């Protein structure tokens, strides 16, 4: 202390008493500065704590609101079939119509996840029992008074022109009129877009496969989300351009939605740049040309050959199977890549499957997929709707043996029966089919 006073006295040229005063003033200033810094630190800490508490409260309120909304939506759901009236029937393009369905009781309809479908029970002329079919909802979930499905009249298979056209699609497009009543189950299905996520997505479709993709894109556009979305749609030409105006409007005024329409066989009157963007098919080469990277989630729906081409191409491009999602209606044509066999690991057991009514017995192995796929390979007819374990159409009685399910079921199979679209044998099996 004495040395500090002497140093100040020499430096400032003042007497000892004044030097002592400078020392005490400096000490006091340092102490007050430390107290001020401590107070500021406490204030910042308290502010952070209040901000965190406010954020926690906001999240709790949001979660509570979501729970209330989900509870309210759950109360609107129904079991079994509910009657809907066709409020509007609108032709979209050649052979394709949209049906706006309002509940006959005029009560609100529950929201759905974009990509889900409705299961219909149709009383078609000439059929001794109702026909069950599933069709994707083609509009956004932000409507409480109607659902919309868009359906293409399916003709005979190109390689079998002698066969009749699609029963359900012909009934919808040729028979049903505005004002008619039909029966539908509540929205279902696991092929859907999670609107809580912000992951960038690529929506890929061809033909009438655009319907679930349009629902997903409309949901993003209607919700004012800034989620990055690339929308690829393929058709042969303008006669098959489904929901043309709606697709064109998706990117209007939105920088996050990018629409690309491809015509594989454009007509002379189809104008590049206005009617369509690319001459050719939707392809991996086009994705590589336009997308900044392959780091997206991919959703696709369309004809079997189209989906197989796209999924194979995405896999070769390095996109993991876990990032690729596709609609499962119609005969299965797309399969996940089988894992490479592990040296020394036991092989998957094979079982004998007998179709009792058809009097066919065959071997099943894991490469053959579900029992429904096996039946189709053997020429055994089993009615099927959703192919996702939801509609219950493929229910078949088990005469002996046991099965296990490949994924979670929504429909509850009766005891002693199985949903063949999503199960496989776990022992030798006899089915009543």
Image (cartoon, rainbow, N blue to C red):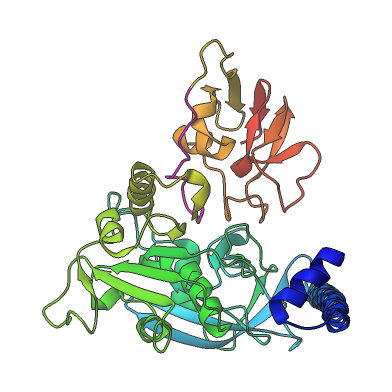
Comparing 7 with 198, the one in front is 7
Q: Indicate whether residue 339 is drawn in magenta.
A: yes
The majority secondary structure of the magenta stretch comes to: loop
Q: Which quarter shows the N terminus?
A: bottom right
Q: Residue 387: horizontal and vertical position, in percent? A: 57, 50
- Residue 281 in the magenta stretch? The answer is no
Q: Quadrant of residue 398?
A: top right
Q: Is residue 64 visible?
A: no
Question: Which residues lie in the magenta part?
Answer: 327-340
| Closer to us: 422 or 399 | 422
The residue positioned 51% from the left and 73% from the top of the image is 227
Residue 138 place in picture, x, y as percent: 51, 75
Placement of the C terminus among the 4 image quadrants: top right
| Residue under the point 67% across and 87% down | 145
Q: Is residue 134 above or below residue 367?
A: below
Q: Is residue 199 above or below residue 371?
A: below
Q: Is residue 247 visible?
A: yes
Q: Is residue 415 above or below residue 1?
A: above
Residue pushed farthest left?
268
Residue closer to the observer: 180 or 35: 35
Residue 149 image point, x, y percent: 53, 75
Toward which corner of the image does residue 244 lie, by quadrant? Answer: bottom left
């Amino acid at each position: 202390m004495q040395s500090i006073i002497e140093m100040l006295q020499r430096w400032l040229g003042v007497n000892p008493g004044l030097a002592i005063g400078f020392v005490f003033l400096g000490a006091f200033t340092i102490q007050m500065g430390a107290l001020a810094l401590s107070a500021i630190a406490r204030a910042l800490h308290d502010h952070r704590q209040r901000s965190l508490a406010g954020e926690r409260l906001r999240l709790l309120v949001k979660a509570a609101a979501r729970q209330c909304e989900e509870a309210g939506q759950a109360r609107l759901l129904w079991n079994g079939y509910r009657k809907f009236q066709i409020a509007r029937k609108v032709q979209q393009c050649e052979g394709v119509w949209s049906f706006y369905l309002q509940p006959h009781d005029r009560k609100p309809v529950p929201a759905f996840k974009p990509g889900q479908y409705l299961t219909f029970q149709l009383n078609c002329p000439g059929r001794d029992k109702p026909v069950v079919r599933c069709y994707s909802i083609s509009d956004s979930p932000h409507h409480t008074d109607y659902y919309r499905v868009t359906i293409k009249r399916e003709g005979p298979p190109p390689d079998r022109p002698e066969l009749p056209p699609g029963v359900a699609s012909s009934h919808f497009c040729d028979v049903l009129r505005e004002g008619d009543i039909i029966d539908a189950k509540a929205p279902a299905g696991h092929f859907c877009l999670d609107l809580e996520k912000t992951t960038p997505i690529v929506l890929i479709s061809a033909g009438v496969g655009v319907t679930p993709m349009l629902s997903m894109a409309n949901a993003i556009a209607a919700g004012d989300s800034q989620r990055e979305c690339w929308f690829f749609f393929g058709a042969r030409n303008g006669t098959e351009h489904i929901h043309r105006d709606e697709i064109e409007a998706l990117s209007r005024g939105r920088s996050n939605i990018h629409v690309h329409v491809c015509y594989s066989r454009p007509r002379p009157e189809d104008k590049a740049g206005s009617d369509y963007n690319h001459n050719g098919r939707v392809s991996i080469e086009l994705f590589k040309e336009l997308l900044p990277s392959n780091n997206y989630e991919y959703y696709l729906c369309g004809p079997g050959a189209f989906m197989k081409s796209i999924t194979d191409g995405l896999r070769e491009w390095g996109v993991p199977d876990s990032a690729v999602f596709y609609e499962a209606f119609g005969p299965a044509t797309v399969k996940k890549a089988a894992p490479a066999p592990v040296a020394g690991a036991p092989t998957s057991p094979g079982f004998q499957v007998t179709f009792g009514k058809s009097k066919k017995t065959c071997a099943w192995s894991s490469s053959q997929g579900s029992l429904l796929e096996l039946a189709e390979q053997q020429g055994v007819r089993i009615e099927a709707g959703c192919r996702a374990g939801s509609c219950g159409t493929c229910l078949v009685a088990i005469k002996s043996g046991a099965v296990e399910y490949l994924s979670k079921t929504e429909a509850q199979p009766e005891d002693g029966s199985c949903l063949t679209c999503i199960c496989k044998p776990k022992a030798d099996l006899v089915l009543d089919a």
